[in-house]
Image (cartoon, helix red, strand yellow):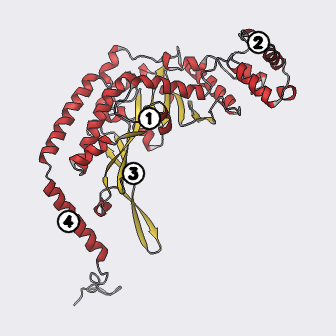
Amino acid sequence: MFDSTTISGLARQVKVTDGGRFQQVAFLQEHGTTFKPTVGYYRSPFTGAQFTMTPEQERHRGDIYWRLHFWLPINAILRGQNYLVGDQWMMPPILHTLARFLRWFLLVFGFTPAEAQYFIDTARFEDMELSYHVAPASLRAAQHAQKRLLRHLECLAEVRTTAYSLWKAHAIRTNKAMTTYAHVEDAVLRTYIKSLLARPTQRKARMVGFVSKNMVPFVPELRQAVYTHLRIEPVLGRQMLIKHGMDTPHGFDPGRVAGAIEDVFAQAGLSTPFVRSIEQVDQTGLSQCVRDTLQHYFAGEDLRELLTPSTRSRHSALLRDVGIETGVSLRDHRMELSGTIGKQIGLANRWEPPQQYHPLMLTDAHLHGLNAHINKEIDRLTRTFSQAAHDMREMERRQGVFLTRNRDPYLSDWLRPPSGLGGTAA
């Protein structure tokens, strides 16, 4: 279920000695060059996959603190493959391992144990990319389902109503591969056929699809296992996570994941039971006026000429509950809207990897081994940490920064030979 996530936390106050601590980018200006911290790329010691750390300055407790953003392709950095993923009930133990992993990294990076602990205490999710597979009967069936989904999304994206929050739907095609995107409020729903996904050009996407050296011999088996599968990836933004109480790793409740995914589906119009004929409409409980509107709609009449805007809006809301979207033409309703595609790709139809593939996935046994190794390294770094030595290094850095900023530019140049002259100065 876990694909990747961005976790951020506060480490400590910004110091003048932090200039060379992080990766930097230079901005050439008229009166000199300005250096600013930027994204840094680091490798997992377990698999070699890259993850990123991006520092950001944030006001906190009346001071300026470092907020560190870690983008983590979880399966890549902890297991070395992203073909097969577990369910949402594996997310809490994975988060415990990630907490240890980040604490270890911060200690190696030069932060004190107290600063690493403060990061853990203030950690929060900035985004969360979930994933699961559905297994159509054949590759052709998977392609057909993906096309139906795209037509459905593109049709609803043109409907201007508050019933959906689908503001954009599009697809990216590369040869036989197609990836569909449905943009809703604070989330994106991405789908593609795993076996046809072309090698991505973006660095982050390559890391999500990373395969470690230890996993290379199993790649043919993994590819065959998901050859006809549709990969469903709901990407949840921070506001969506807050809405469903999933914004912090502390006390994470995997039971809330299904509700968040259903929210994305509902916003994209994938939970509405659309029908294609008037005979399929359950008219029980509908007033005669609403039934008349239904008859006019299936007769191909323009409801904008027959009803006032308020009446049309009210009747449309009632008809939407029984599977009719009057905001689209009758032809598009019959040809493009689907009342089943949402169920077919829903979490309830998630494919469960067979037992034979579990040794290649993030299991409790594998996480236990990682935790034992990380705990050993954390204990070693904590025992050997010396606050006095750390303070001495900080003082040396401050002195270096002071001398660099106050150096007279002529002191280092007066013995240099004039430009264009050879030899050495007398």
Report if the CB atoms under discs 2 and 1 are less than 8 Å apart: no
Q: Nearer the viewer, mark 3 or mark 4?
A: 4
Q: Circle 3 sits on which residue?
A: 39
Dot in front, 3 or 2? 2
**Residue 229 located left or right of residue 22:** right
Q: What separation in Å lies between label 4 and label 2 (alpha carbons)?
A: 80 Å
* Amino acid type of the residue that numbered disc 2 sits on in the rendered structure: Ile
Closer to the eye: label 1 or 3: 1
> Is 315 placed above or below 32 here?
above
Q: Out of 21 and 327, give the one closest to the viewer.
A: 327
Where residue 100 is drawn, which disc sits there? Answer: none
Spatial separation of the CA atoms under disc 1 and disc 4 = 40 Å
Return the residue at label 4.
396
Q: Is disc 2 placed on a helix, strand or loop?
A: helix
| Distance (Cα) linking label 1 and label 3 | 19 Å
Nearest to N terminus: mark 2 or mark 1: 1
Q: Quadrant of residue 264?
A: top right
N-terminal label among 3 and 4: 3
Q: Which residue is mark 1?
A: 128
Q: Residues within 10 Å of mark 1 (few under 14, many from 20)?
A: many
Quadrant where the image shows the C terminus: bottom left
Q: Which of the two discs, 1 and 4, labels the residue nearer the N terminus?
A: 1
User: Going from the N terminus, do you reach mark 4 or mark 2 first?
Assistant: 2
Kindly tell me whether residue 134 is visible in this rendering: yes
**Quadrant the N terminus occupies:** top left
Read off the residue under disc 2. Answer: 278
